[in-house]
Amino acid sequence: MAQLQATPVRTLSLSGRRRGGGAATRPQRSMVAFRCSASARGYNITLLPGDGIGPEVVAVAKDALSVAGSKEGFELRFQEMLMGGAALDAVGVPLPDETLAAARKSDAILLGAIGGYKWDNNEKHLKPETGLLSIRAGLGVFANLRPATVLPQLVDASTLKKEVAEGVDIMVVRELTGGIYFGKPRGFGTNDKGEEIGFNTELYAVSEIDRIARVAFEVARKRGGKLCSVDKANVLEASMLWRKRVSAIASEYPDVELSHMYVDNAAMQLVRNPKQFDTIVTNNIFGDILSDEASMITGSIGMLPSASVGESGPGLFEPIHGSAPDIAGQDKANPLATILSAAMLLKYGLGLESAAKRIELGTYILLARHWLDASEWERKS
Ligand code: IPM
Ligand code: MG
């Protein structure tokens, strides 16, 4: 963060809550932590609207942030930068150097969405998605928090039966800068029969597993105290190491109940009985898939925010949905996931919990109103 060197500083745990007296009895292992200048009442936010519905939803979230700031007495300074297809069209690369540099210098980054049909057939290095992966790697944001919470007002929107969906409150902690997304060797080639092949490598080092495991244990400790690690340790070596290290790190967190589950079973259990899960920790690709699945339990992927954070430096906050080019520019996009991402930015990125609460409460009130209006309408019709 820009204020990293500023003093005095306060250190925030990943959950956004300061370690208090309650934690004193627990092992005080350090973990990923944010350091924000306590005296700073102004923050620099990089906005990356991106493509499709991205600019629409980011504009709404920006307003929500400004209102929260003015109510809480701090100033947010916004700088909009190019990213994804918008950057490809303007300057020919999906992540311009200036964008990464500005993002690194800021206190937090809010991203809308990237991608669209127009760039789908581009070469890999010219795909909007490559820009997204590069900014995640460039910022070192290895821990991606994706909450899937079923709101009472929206339980009927879930595709699952009410009794299965109600009360679901899951946090998926996805490893974001390793695994098959980044592992080498990768590429295209030819096999010994002369056939064209494509290949990737699922690869994790101990340090990568240990740091994401610690984040997940910290998150679980502040939630329901249960952590389920999802892997494919019956087949994949990278998963065998994953399971071994997560089990080893568990000894630092005796207050958290750890379980392990194979990913195929986890995918099934998420729709069979999602309430059994509290916090899930998993690798990059399983996290990508399971977080989309978990989002649908809540009724809509359009509702789910995410926070990506690293050991130091600014966090990246983005809705988990895509750029929805089919509805872009029609004022139909649901901005809630981005608004809730803005709340996560305040809470996890800047440590401004009460400001985050304002946005969360505002969102829930909005939803409650919407729901009341809908039931009113149903009664009339
Ligand atoms: C996500 C997205 C990205 C991912 C894509 C757009 C590269 O699906 O954030 O979940 O696979 O990580
Ligand atoms: Mg995804």
Image (cartoon, rainbow, N blue to C red):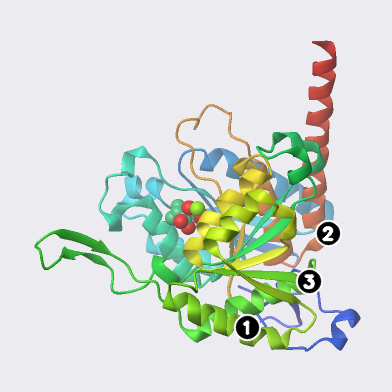
Compared to 370, does 149 lie above or below? below
Inspect the image, locate mark 2, and give the three-letter code of the amino acid beneath it.
Ser
Distance between the Cα atoms at labels 2 and 3? 24 Å
Residue 247, given in percent of the width and then of the height, sits at 63, 83
Inspect the image, locate mark 3, and give the three-letter code of the amino acid beneath it.
Gly
Compared to 167, does 21 lie above or below? below
Inspect the image, locate mark 1, and give the three-letter code of the amino acid beneath it.
Ser
Sequence-wise, the earlier of marks 1 and 2 is 1
**Residue that numbered label 2 is attached to:** 354
> What residue is drawn where x is 70% and y is 52%?
273
Q: Which of marks 2 and 3 is in front?
A: 3
Compared to 185, does 273 lie above or below? above
Q: Is mark 3 on a helix, strand or loop?
A: loop
Nearer to me, 50 or 266: 266
Q: Residue 247 carries which label?
A: 1
Q: Which of marks 3 and 1 is in front?
A: 1
Residue 177, given in percent of the width and then of the height, sits at 47, 70
Nearer to me, 232 or 222: 232
> What residue is drawn where x is 27% and y is 45%?
121
For the N terminus, which image quadrant? bottom right
Distance between the Cα atoms at labels 3 and 1? 15 Å
Compared to 130, does 366 lie above or below? above
Q: Residues within 10 Å of mark 3 (few under 14, many from 20)?
A: some
**Residue that numbered label 3 is attached to:** 225
